[in-house]
Amino acid sequence: MVRIHPTAVIDPAAQLDSTVEVGAYSVIGPHVSIGAGSRIGPHVVIEGRTTIGSDNTIFQFGSIGAVPQDKKYAGEPTGLEIGDRNTIREFVTLNLGTAQDAGVTRIGSDNLLMAYVHVAHDCQLGNHLVLANNATLAGHVHLYDWVFLGGFTSVHQFCRIGAHAMTAFTAAVSQDVPPFVTAAGNRAIPAGINSEGLRRRGFSSSQIMSIKRAYKLIYRAGLSLEQAQEAILAEEQKDAESAVHLKLLREFIETSSRGIIR
């Protein structure tokens, strides 16, 4: 079976596993590496120092590894790394990193990036993410595991979105979103926790209730953030089943440089 369409343009220096499929009129540059079982659709451009793992599917018209949309970029040898088993739909744009940050944009594994998603320079994305249509990440954004971004979500540069958090349709995120929290609105504000997502991932009812109590300590009890963190720490110490999740929430808040949505 012919795996490389005869109209595809692949630089001889590119490293493609023998099982990689490349569709019609796609262009692959010299510094690109693509792992076993990955499928590249038609009219895809993959350039820059881009490493793509195994069993990824990139649909038509993707722009992968283009230079950053950053005026400071001066041609430094920065990169893009994509893990395994990702689905990258039509017109997705993934940019290289910059020398001013990690020098690499990273996409983890088992993610779904729907049509027209944009991931800017130096973003760091975890695993099991869903970015719905037209979700847009500015530079230096961090998404932790199991994040769900609703359609047309926009995330300001340097923001972090914690594990198991989600955003509603058209959310505009300008501060950090703590783990487990749902963010909605422009500008995004907290709108409860992602209870349904937690249930689907096997969290017990008691764990979900513990996370809800922690949410109320942060957002409903009239406490300062420092007081809320102390109260969550006390909950950790008496709730062994939920301690790891409460600690994740508390430490995320402690390490926030932009501040969390309020």
Image (cartoon, helix red, strand yellow):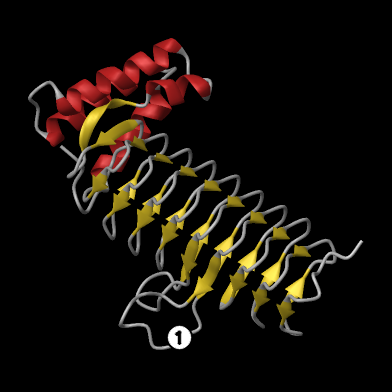
Q: How many marks?
A: 1
Residue at 47% over, 53% down: 125
* Residue 210 vertical position relative to residue 246 in the rendered view, above or below: above
Q: Can residue 205 be seen in this snapshot? A: yes
Is 119 positioned to the left or the right of 159 in the image?
right
Image location (x, y in percent) of residue 190: 22, 32
Is 212 positioned to the left or the right of 107 in the image?
left
Q: Could you say which quadrant of the image residue 235 lies in?
A: top left
Is 235 positioned to the left or the right of 129 in the image?
left
Q: Extreme top residue here?
A: 205
Image location (x, y in percent) of residue 47: 58, 77
Image location (x, y in percent) of residue 166: 36, 36
**Front-most of 132 and 42?**
42
Name the residue tied to disc 1: 76
**Front-most of 17 and 249?**
17
Residue at 32% over, 36% down: 168
Q: Residues within 10 Å of mark 1 (few under 14, many from 20)?
A: few
- Quadrant location, the N terminus: bottom right
Residue at 34% over, 14% down: 209
**Front-most of 17 and 115?**
115
Dot 1: what SS? loop
* Residue 240 vertical position relative to residue 261 in the rendered view, above or below: above
- Quadrant location, the C terminus: top left
* Residue 192 vertical position relative to residue 153 in the rendered view, above or below: above
Going by the numbered disc 1, the residue's amino acid type is Glu
Q: Could you say which quadrant of the image residue 223 lies in?
A: top left
**Front-most of 126 and 230?**
126
